[in-house]
Amino acid sequence: MTTTVHRNFKQVADAESARSALLAGGFSASSVTLNAHTIGDSPDLVAGAVESIIDQLTPGGEGAAVRARHQEGALLSVDTDDDDQRQQADAIMQRFGAVEA
């Protein structure tokens, strides 16, 4: 049964390095997905309104939410077929500073 391992990275470059290491470690390109966090303002009015409401509910207030939203980072996901692959993927990603998603 396939299990997907998701890990966050504070820097996109670290996630890219982990992705390269996973590929070099035998994982197929189709099993590894890197998604950079979106940096910037909301693309439309509705999303902006929802963001504003959530910002007001965020611990630390709107300022903390805005700072967090503008941080660089990435999510790296790896599809694994068994526990050995899952442990291998996790070990590789941790070498590059991964944290649980």
Image (cartoon, rainbow, N blue to C red):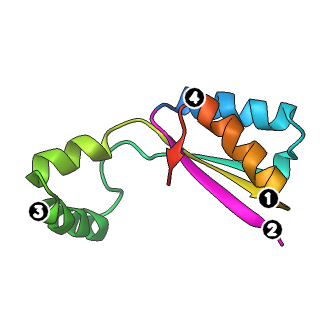
Among numbered discs 4 and 1, the one appearing first in the sequence: 4
Q: Main secondary structure of the magenta part?
A: strand
- The answer to which of 40 and 22 lies nearer the viewer is 22
Front position in the image: 101 or 75: 101
- Report the residue marked by disc 3: 56
Mark whose residue sits in front, 4 or 1: 1
- Label 2 secondary element: loop
Where, quadrant-wise, is the N terminus in this rendering?
bottom right
Tell me the residue at 90%/40% (across/down). 26
Q: Position of residue 79 (x, y in %)?
A: 77, 58
Q: Which residue is mark 2?
A: 2
| Closer mark to the observer between disc 3 and disc 1 | 1
SS under mark 1: helix
Picture quarter containing residue 29?
Answer: top right
Left or right relative to 48: residue 92? right
Residue 4 against residue 77 in the figure, above or below: below
The amino acid type, in three-letter code, at marker 2 is: Thr
Name the disc covering residue 83, or none. Answer: 1
Q: Nearer the viewer, mark 2 or mark 3?
A: 2
Q: Residue at x 30, y 47 (%)?
A: 69
Q: CA distance from mark 4 to mark 1?
A: 24 Å
Q: Amino acid at mark 3?
A: Gln
User: How busy is the neighbourhood of tag 1: few (under 14 within 10 Å), some, or many (20 plus)?
Assistant: few
User: What secondary structure is marked by label 4?
Assistant: helix
Q: CA distance from mark 2 to mark 3?
A: 39 Å
Q: Mark 3 vs mark 1: which is more N-terminal?
A: 3
The boundaries of the magenta stretch are: 1-10
